[in-house]
Image: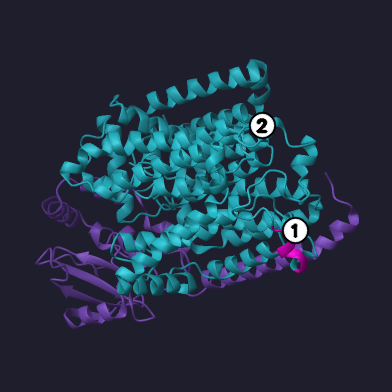
Chain colours: A cyan, B purple
Amino acid sequence: MSEALFVAMLQVVGAVFAAAVVRDVGRLGAAIMGLPLGMALYGLATAALLTMRIPFHSLGALAVVGVLTVAWGIAAVGGRGLRRFAPTLGVAAAVAVAGSALFQVLHLTRVTADSFRYLALAGIISETGELAAATPGLLRTRSLLAAVPHTGPGASDTLYLASIMPLLGLAGLATFTWLAWRTLRERGWSSTVVILVVASAGAFLLSTDRLVFNLFYLNVHLLIGVYAMLMVAALWLRSQGHPPGWTAVAAVTAAALVVSRPEGPLLAALLAVPGLTSLRIPLRERWAVALAIAATCVGWYAIRLAPLLDDGLREDLVLGALVAATGVVGLAAASSWSATRRVTAHAPLLVFLALVVLLGVLAANDPAIAETAVRASWENVTGRGLWRGTWLIVPVLFLLALAVSRLPAPQFWTFPILAFPVFLLALGLLRGTGYRVGPGDSGNRMLAHILLVSVLFIVMSVGWGDGRGLLRSRSRRIDAPGHAAVGRTTARNSYEERCGTVGPDFRPGG
Amino acid sequence: MPRPRAEASRRTPLGGVLVVTFVAGTALNLSGLLAPSEVSVAFRPLRSQDSARLLELERGTTAGLRFDFYLHLREHVQASSLTIFRGGFVDPANALGLAGIPVVIEGYEADLRPDQAAALAERSVVSGTHRSGWEYFIVADADEREPGSYRLMRLDRQAYVASEARLAAMGVDWRGGS
């Protein structure tokens, strides 16, 4: 099977999943989100097979995911609904095939030491059908997600798929555009202004050196950036009355993040904090997200990888996953009890403060490394990291967005964006080496994880703002972190207007 | 639901601020992208004897990793693609690896601070300026874990080492044909 066909099948599987579970996504939205979701589902199926020690075969994993997704699609929208979707699927698959062929010809792939390790892992999995031959060194500082696409049948000749990352990245940017366009149009912005805003934001992203580099780089950073954006957006959309299917999107992307990098479980848990504690999302759906994260943590790290501890796998890898699993389950449970709900209503603020305290303790424990990490990170974002002007512009626009926004439930966005740099520095100190100057530095590369979330928040916030925002920003930010109360926002919410009112699903604890 | 025209017009300046700032950011980003290239890539292809030597070395030094992948991969990643990225997106260390310079894979990420680079430079056995413009030096025994190994270090314009590649086996004529 060719690489292009494999990519097209991932695209179709993801698009069917999106169309089946998210009722208001539309054919275009489903097609746009198809490849990222298809890759996430394929990655999770691979993780599940390896965890259960079922011999892996790429076509087998793809078939399992495909059959389950189509069955779910038929159950959700019926055979007729899927048939109506078929022409769009055909076009999406054709675009994927053409794009794959194009990027195979252009062949702009970038590789570094990390890439080789991911590809070595992919080669072991695809050749042996299991993980046994993988050394702890391959799993110690990396994880499964970036390796999985290259287990595909199209990689049999070249050992990697040259088109998968650029297509995933473009799908991520298309998703960004679609979400921004939809939100701004629903807020009543004229199509001309929306085109200008979305196009300029897209140009800004596409001119970002490290983002373009990641489009062709065999590593996991672009995947994490896209999944973080999808997860945050999905949770926020669900909190605004959009269909429950968005929770499924959040659960799938959160689980994918868990197996993305060693700190993936903690990152997924962090991004989930506002959603897990928001009464705008029904309790059973909060539990679904929490259990998706916890089950993946336990399955992959505690069951599959823990036996490698005797061979040199780091204990903190498993420990971090268990902390994340316990944290998300604890938050979901606490938010469901009236006795603890007063506390969980402030969870984003409390978790943020806890992170700051943790960072302070770590920095006090080793000030030299802390200083090195901060200096290196500063030099990286101001030039040496090859981000050019991106991280000079984004913080300024973020502050503007905070000032003018009437975005309801902003903590879904502001908490991850504000917590991420603290989390990043704490990680550098936890590993005992801090960060260093240069584009290849781990901390510098990880900045890509939060870029799409940040820029999308900026665009959406301004979409929800008005010309008087700078003067009235303090008085209306009532749904800030820690104020997740239902119906207390005065912001005009087009979703709620469309739905009439907040439905029964949004009762506290419901 | 569409907003009233008056409100839409009141918000237009916000959209304008956003557009102008994004455009300014794009210009800032592109100014770096369009700057003169730090490295032009015109290296020779990897010779078969270099491949064999490197493979032998790598298998001997790092057990468990499948370095045959590495050599195989390099056959497929063509240096020609770098021309598209010249000036902005090219990573010099990556360029070396892709162009066939025998780069041992662990060596890539060791960007160094200026003081570290200076300390290493004092121990250099060979130094000079490459035809493409960048300064280099070769350090013996740079890695305490692997006595007898050599590293090719590159200095960038800010006088810190932006990337490194390790010449693990001497006798590899990495400058040939460049």
Residue B94, quarter of the rendered image: bottom left
- Residue at 72% in and 33% down: A503
- Residue at 13% in and 68% down: B144
Residue B78, quarter of the rendered image: bottom left
Would you name the residue on which mark 1 appears? Answer: A465
Would you name the residue on which mark 2 appears? Answer: A505
Q: Is residue A473 magenta?
A: yes
Q: Nearer the viewer, residue A168 or A454?
A: A454
- Please give the label number shown on residue A199: none
Classify mark 2: residues with Cα within 10 Å, few (<14), some (14-19) or many (20+): some
Left or right of B110 in this view: B173: left
In magenta, the rendered stretch is A471-477
- Residue at 16% in and 80% down: B123
Task: Locate the C terminus of chain A by quadrant.
Answer: top right
Q: Position of residue A372 (x, y in %)?
A: 34, 73
Depth check, mark 1 against mark 2: the one in front is 2
- Does A331 appear above or below A9? below
Q: Amino acid at mark 2?
A: Asp
* Distance between the alpha carbons at the discs numbered 1 and 2: 27 Å
Q: Amino acid at mark 1?
A: Gly
Task: Locate the N terminus of chain A by quadrant.
Answer: top left
Q: Position of residue A346 (x, y in %)?
A: 56, 51
Q: In this rendering, does residue A156 appear at all? A: no
